[in-house]
Image (cartoon, rainbow, N blue to C red):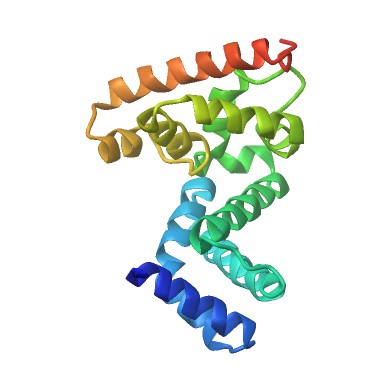
């Protein structure tokens, strides 16, 4: 029996397929706060976060149909993340300080092959496949913490709170996960640091 979330998701997808303007309104009601919060964490600006949220709705409108993203929320969050990172690229480096992205990408930099930054790395297919394998080898708790910090760009404090641990413990876990990632990439011959 389908749960309430899957019914809502199917209703939204049906509205998009029917090209109903209600599709965007319903998506906003259901997922808007999550998308805005994610963009705000990356950008540090409520105005920019709202613009990214609207870009997500436009992208969904243009891609559904033919795409049938299931589950819908991770697909929307991926678009949100990409649009926010694109917006960061357009900003002057001196003006980026309000968001978490630069700090997080700097953290992750030491675990990535030299010559790559977080944005380039995320786009490379072989590394994407390796990352999927790496994540599959982690415990569910480790995977959750890694993704919260490096995919959803939560602060260390937020990661700690969502996992019932102290911020110092979260920092240690994240450090160890970055070291595991580096070791994994070395074994996969994808590290040239």
Quarter of the rendering occupied by the N terminus: bottom left
Quarter of the rendering occupied by the C terminus: top right
Tell which of 58 and 39 is nearer to you.
58
Residue 124: percent from the left, percent from the top? 76, 35
Above or below, 137 relative to 75? above
Quarter of the image holding residue 80?
bottom right
Instruction: Judge from the rendering whether residue 8 lies leftward or rightward of residue 192; answer left or right.
Output: left
Tell which of 106 and 44 is nearer to you.
106
Residue 145: percent from the left, percent from the top? 40, 33
Above or below, 134 relative to 60? above
Above or below, 51 relative to 43? below
Residue 151: percent from the left, percent from the top? 52, 40
Quarter of the image holding residue 66?
bottom right
Counting the numbered discs, the total is: 0
Q: Residue furthest front?
A: 1
Instruction: Judge from the rendering whether residue 120 lies leftward or rightward of residue 8; answer left or right.
Output: right
């Amino acid at each position: 029996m389908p749960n309430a979330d899957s019914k809502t998701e199917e209703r939204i997808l049906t509205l998009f397929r029917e090209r109903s303007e209600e599709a965007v309104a319903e998506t906003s009601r259901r997922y808007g706060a999550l998308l805005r919060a994610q963009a705000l964490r990356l950008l540090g600006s409520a105005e920019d976060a709202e613009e990214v949220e609207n870009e997500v709705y436009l992208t969904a409108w243009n891609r559904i149909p033919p795409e049938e993203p299931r589950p819908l929320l991770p697909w929307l969050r991926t678009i949100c993340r990409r649009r926010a990172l694109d917006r960061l690229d357009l900003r002057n480096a001196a003006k980026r300080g309000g968001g978490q992205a630069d700090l997080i990408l700097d953290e992750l930099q030491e675990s990535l092959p030299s010559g790559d930054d977080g944005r380039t790395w995320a786009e490379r297919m072989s590394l994407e496949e390796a990352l999927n394998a790496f994540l599959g080898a982690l415990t569910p708790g480790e995977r959750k913490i890694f993704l919260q910090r490096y995919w959803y760009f939560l602060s260390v404090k937020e990661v700690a709170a969502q996992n019932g641990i102290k911020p110092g413990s979260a920092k240690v876990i994240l450090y160890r996960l970055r070291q595991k990632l580096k070791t994994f990439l070395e074994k996969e011959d994808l590290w040239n640091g």
